[in-house]
Image: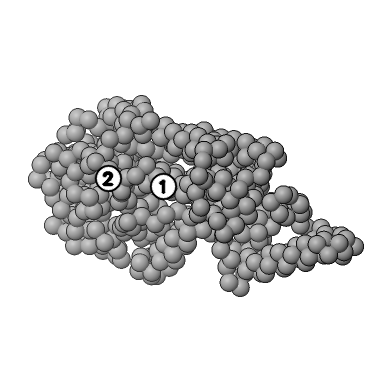
Amino acid sequence: MALRFYNSLTGRKEEFSPSRPDFVAIYSCGPTVYDYAHIGNFRAFLFVDLLRRHLLFRGYSLKQAINLTDVEDKIIQRAAERGMPIDQYTAPFIEAFLEDLDFLRVLAPEHRPRATEHIPAMLEMIAELQRRQHAYVADGSVYFRLATFSEYGRLSRIDPEQLRAAADGRFDADEYTKEDLRDFALWKAASADDAAAWASPWGRGRPGWHIECSAMIQDLFGPQGVDIHTGGIDLLFPHHENEIAQSRCSHPEGAFVRYWLHNEHLLVDGRKMSKSAGNFYAMVDFRDAKRIKDLLGRGAPEELLRIYERGNLGVAIRYLLLATHYRQKLNFTFDGLLAAEQAILRLRRAAERLSEICGESAAVPEQTTSPWSALSAESLRLFGDALDDDLNISRALAAVFDFVRELNILLESQRPDAGQAAAALNFLVEADRTLDLLRADPPIPGSSASADQKQRERIEALIADRQLARAARNFTQADAIRLQLDQMGVAIKDTPAGVVWQWK
């Protein structure tokens, strides 16, 4: 089955065909780092992580860029209020964003460009637009002349003529100098007291937001642009529409972007996230026990801290944000987060049962075809085919959990040998290259998660002691250990593959 993606530009699913065989160039709009990124922002990055991993699964090589917008009006204003340069102001938010991505297991891109590092490319693109009569200067600022690009509005299905009425009464004072209210700034003239400004042929100033991505794409990937451009649906207009106008008009020979993929919004308890509604959660709030306790005071369940202490909070958020198709709105709830952890534990129990049977022989292939290898091969086919269809994660996860159900049925009736177990386990291993759910979050030194690792080691030791007591037919001691584990909140189950335990 061929890869197919829903292209926002054409409004339909299309067979994927990159400009170069077996190589994909991807650009993803990153955050504007004026504050900590909220949990809704990360849906876009988990969506593109799924996209990246599936392309790798299908044998493509790729290069991906996720930019950091580190110069923008809010950044300049807040840095000035605090009396610091913008790079000093943005540094902690950039560091937190990168740590958040690691917490959610998002693979690092090949490029992480910062807008302030590509000012020369922006100046060059603006000058080319001016040379081609697509831009003009007014009082030291440079504006894109929208009337010169007849394709404007194709991505957003917006009639450019209707923009004039929409813009009326909704523009800043400096925009009175425009030829047309629809025109947008490529370069903004700096005032005398602006701390963040760069020299340009038009005087000191700073880039407009839209030119930044266009210039970085050209700088990193050349005038031919990229195969896939991703971002949240809120960026489709005007940001991505303006990107197309700038890039196509400065380099009309280039395609710029072949496929536009946009993810839908994240809702919280059915409402738009906002600080006034009290449902605004910075991603950083989920990475530290102290911050989580603050969330408990705002109505989060106590179990949230338990998930963190079990080393499963990052992966549970990952699962929750991935498990709904990227083009559907996703409703974030804490109940959904608890259910996500249970789904992950179900997968891990299946993998653990097979791993225990494999033992030291996990790499030994099965010599003959059996229900175990057939189940694994068919599940992997269904999993891959689902993601080939515009990243249909619902069908892909259905293939995973159908596998677990069928596996448990097989294990009830027969015990596989090591080779058969390895053949079955292969599906979970291969699927997890894309999903990345089977490993727990690493313990954080000095945190409650680190203490939890010691508790896990204690539990494993008690289970081993119970097994020795049972082997010696000392059932009184075995029952006492089981009671001790129960009081610790641990449920154990004796299975043919060994003892399986989980938190209650």
What kind of residue is marked 1?
A: Arg
Question: As displayed, is residue 197 above or below residue 498?
Answer: below
Determine which quarter of the picture holds residue 487.
bottom right
Give the camera-side residue of 419 and 350: 419
Tell me where residue 439 appears, x and y as whole percent: 56, 56
Q: Are marks 1 and 2 in contact (CB under 8 Å)?
A: no
Horizontal side, residue 80 vs residue 481: left or right: left
**For this rendering, which residue is in front, 351 or 256?**
351
Which type of secondary structure does the marked residue at label 2 adopt? strand
Q: Which residue is mark 2?
A: 23
**Between marks 1 and 2, how big is the CA–CA gap?**
14 Å
Expressed as whole percent of the image width and height from the top left, the position of residue 503 reads 72, 55
Q: Is residue 192 above or below residue 409?
A: below
User: Could you tell me residue 391's position as x and y percent?
Assistant: 44, 36
Answer with mark 1 or mark 2, whichever residue precedes in sequence: 2
Which residue lies at the image location 37% right of the left edge and 47% below the top edge?
A: 56
Q: Residue furthest right?
A: 476
Disc 2 residue type?
A: Phe
Q: Which residue is mark 1?
A: 53
